């Protein structure tokens, strides 16, 4: 493919789905592997993707995108991109924090922010991948006039637009038609539409047919070219086959208002069994549709009656009043049926997601939900979005939740096994100490034969008891390890399932304030800490505590006076332990909190890597990632130092200055 985009003009890339429009833009951006040929671009690039990329920051940050703030240019771009009305809705205007991936914005709002970002960059070449796909027709006309058109903000810039919108194609200076990744037509709009059978005409005719079909095959579609008459022919053919929309609405309204007859006929034709209670009353959504269609039918009847009165004479007012009264009675009857059927259980038809929000078309796959308190999604400021870090001791409720999920049986078996292992270990030590006293008894024996006999039997007895105690120690240790390991797996699965269950059931407003990286951090590093570290620390603490208790008891039984120094030593130990545990605990929290921005930034960068490369900010985002890694590494390094047994000096403490000694004289 050899194609030239004139400088300072707009070029529309046109083609069916899969023809290679987005691939051509990616090739211009350098995101595709080049086998042969070359791409020459003069100047800087701004890129607007088909799916707008919004990062977690304020609306102003998303528009400026690391550019210096210019108030005059900024206001001009807001007006051109129709964002000023949206700023009046936000609690903090353009300083309002936008949630992760712009979750609290509609699809059209995100797309307009992406277009405003491109306009603010003041690039030389602008690449647009179907920029008006998620935007309402009225707002699209405004953007076409103020931004993308021949007299808009980018009128003197080179614009390359992958277009489906008919007005975008009509207002382009040059048009490139693609089919199967090949350039088949190139030229101006007037040149390519001169021939009735041109590929562009065929494409526009198919687009018009799709619009007619999407509009219900009954609405008027504006013809861009006098050669294209498919709209009128489709409408005439459709009206010959199908009844007009007024007649269809009347028939559908009649079917819904006479629901019992309609439902029984449908169920008998489709051989489906439906409870009699559901056959007696229509679903509430269908009732609302029926009321709406009845109102439409009534309005059309009144308009037809008014026309007839103008042509044939005045109509009788009593007939109209009686008809309106009958319609109102039917509507009241339908509402009473809805209230009587409100307690009927059964499948209901969910209403379609809202398709227009603030003048924009939202994605059907992610319907916008609003909180019950506000008319729109809850949006917070930067201060409210910062992750809060706990302080102080970990509450016993947290440990109890973990122990409770292990189970009382496994906890009891594990604790008793560890106590048994420690007692067996102490028993082996005591048995060896007693065994060492047998030599004195052997020396007191006078008969050598008796000495040898007693020594042999005593050694066998000692070895048997020592082996039995060692076996008990190994058995109890193995049982304790296995029991606590199984309990840890059980507790981790239960905690993970409970956490996942909560995340799947939180309202969407939760994700307006919580970045995705924070959730990923909880599911990754925090869950890994519970998997690997918590049980090991708990087991080590229990073993050390039991060992200290047994050693203290043995020492006190042999030398009671040792209790006094051990008492003061324990006080010093607990004081040092409180300082160490508080420091280590808070450093661990800092480590955990500082990981969330890393996950958030990494996921945002992966989603917007094409946009970041296009604007030339790849090295900047690498630097931001390095800064966040350094912040986390400082916490990790401090945690490692705190875990060392040596007492570290405060690095902030200023050391006293010692003057250096005077130099020694040479030769003296």
Image (cartoon, rainbow, N blue to C red):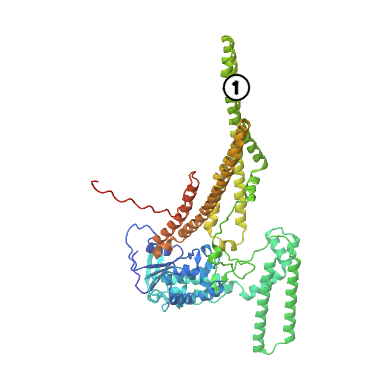
Percent of width and height locating residue 201: 43, 72
Q: Quadrant of residue 13?
A: bottom left
Q: Residue at x 36, y 68 (%)?
A: 44
Q: In the image, is residue 524 above or below residue 545?
A: below
Q: 173 left or right of 580?
A: left
Farthest residue toward the front?
A: 668
Q: Residue at x 41, y 59 (%)?
A: 623
Percent of width and height locating residue 376: 59, 69
Q: 179 left or right of 533?
A: left
Rendered-image quadrant of the N terminus: bottom left
Q: Secondary structure at mark 1?
A: helix
Q: 579 left or right of 319?
A: left
Q: Quadrant of residue 259?
A: bottom right
Q: In this orientation, which residue lies closer to the viewer: 189 or 160? A: 160
Q: Residue at x 62, y 57 (%)?
A: 505
Percent of width and height locating residue 612: 42, 63
Q: In the image, is residue 198 above or below residue 610?
A: below
**Total label count?**
1
List the residue tagged with mark 1.
464
Q: In this orientation, which residue lies closer to the viewer: 247 or 391? A: 391
Percent of width and height locating residue 650: 47, 52
């Amino acid at each position: 493919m050899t194609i030239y985009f004139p400088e300072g003009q707009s070029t529309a890339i046109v083609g069916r789905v899969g023809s290679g429009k987005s691939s051509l833009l990616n090739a211009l951006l350098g995101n595709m592997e080049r086998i042969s040929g070359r791409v020459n671009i003069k100047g800087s690039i701004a890129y607007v993707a088909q799916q707008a990329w919004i990062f977690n920051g304020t609306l102003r940050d998303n528009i400026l995108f690391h550019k210096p703030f210019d108030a005059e240019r900024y206001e001009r771009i807001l007006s051109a991109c129709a964002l000023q009305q949206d700023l009046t809705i936000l609690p903090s205007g353009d300083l309002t924090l936008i949630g992760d991936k712009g979750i609290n914005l509609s699809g059209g709002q995100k797309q307009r922010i992406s277009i405003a970002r491109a306009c603010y960059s003041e690039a030389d070449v602008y690449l647009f991948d179907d920029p008006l796909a998620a935007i309402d027709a009225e707002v699209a006309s405004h953007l076409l006039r103020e931004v993308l058109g021949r007299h808009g903000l980018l009128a003197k810039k080179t614009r390359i637009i992958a277009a489906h919108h008919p007005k975008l194609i009509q207002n382009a200076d040059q048009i490139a038609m693609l089919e199967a990744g090949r350039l088949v037509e190139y030229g101006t709009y007037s040149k390519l539409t001169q021939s009735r059978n041109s590929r562009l005409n065929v494409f526009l005719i198919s687009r018009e047919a799709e619009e007619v079909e999407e509009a219900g095959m009954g609405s008027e579609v504006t013809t861009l070219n006098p050669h294209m008459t498919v709209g009128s022919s489709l409408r005439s053919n459709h009206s010959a086959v199908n009844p007009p929309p007024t007649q269809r609405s009347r028939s559908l309204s009649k079917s819904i208002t006479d629901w019992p007859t309609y439902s029984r006929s449908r169920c008998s034709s489709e051989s489906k069994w439906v409870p009699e209670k559901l056959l007696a009353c229509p679903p509430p959504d269908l009732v609302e549709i029926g009321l709406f269609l009845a109102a439409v039918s009534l309005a059309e009847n009144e308009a037809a009656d008014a026309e007839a009165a103008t042509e044939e004479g005045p109509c009788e007012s009593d007939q109209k009043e009686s008809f309106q009264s009958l319609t109102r009675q039917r509507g009241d009857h339908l509402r009473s049926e809805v209230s009587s059927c409100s307690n009927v259980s059964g499948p209901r038809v969910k209403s379609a997601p809202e398709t227009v929000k603030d003048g924009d078309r939202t994605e059907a796959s992610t319907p916008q939900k609003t909180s019950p308190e506000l008319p729109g999604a809850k949006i917070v400021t930067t201060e409210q979005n910062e992750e809060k870090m706990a302080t102080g001791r970990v509450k016993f409720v947290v440990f109890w939740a973990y122990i409770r999920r292990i189970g009382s049986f496994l906890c009891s078996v594990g604790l008793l096994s560890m106590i048994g292992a420690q007692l067996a270990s102490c028993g082996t030590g005591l048995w060896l100490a007693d065994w060492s006293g047998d030599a004195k008894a052997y020396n007191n024996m006078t008969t050598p034969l008796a000495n040898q006999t007693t020594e042999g039997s005593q050694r066998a007895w000692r070895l048997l008891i020592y082996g039995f105690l060692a076996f008990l120690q190994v058995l109890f240790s193995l049982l304790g390890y296995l029991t606590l390991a199984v309990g840890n797996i059980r507790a981790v699965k239960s905690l993970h399932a409970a956490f996942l269950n909560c995340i799947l059931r939180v309202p969407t407003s939760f994700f307006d304030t919580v970045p995705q990286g924070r959730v990923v951090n909880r599911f990754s590093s925090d869950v890994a800490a519970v998997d690997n570290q918590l049980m090991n620390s708990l087991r080590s603490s229990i073993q050390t505590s039991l060992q200290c208790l047994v050693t203290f008891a043995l020492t006190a039984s042999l030398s009671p006076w040792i209790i006094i120094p051990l008492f003061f030593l324990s006080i010093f130990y607990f004081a040092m332990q409180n300082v160490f545990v508080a420091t280590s605990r808070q450093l661990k929290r800092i480590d955990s909190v500082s990981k969330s921005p890393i996950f958030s930034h990494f996921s945002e960068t992966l989603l917007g890597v094409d946009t970041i490369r296009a604007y030339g900010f790849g090295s900047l985002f690498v630097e931001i990632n390095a800064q966040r890694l350094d912040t986390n590494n400082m916490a990790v390094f401090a945690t490692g130092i705190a875990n060392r047994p040596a007492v570290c000096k405060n690095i902030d403490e200023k050391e006293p200055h010692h003057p250096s000694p005077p130099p020694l004289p040479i030769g003296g």
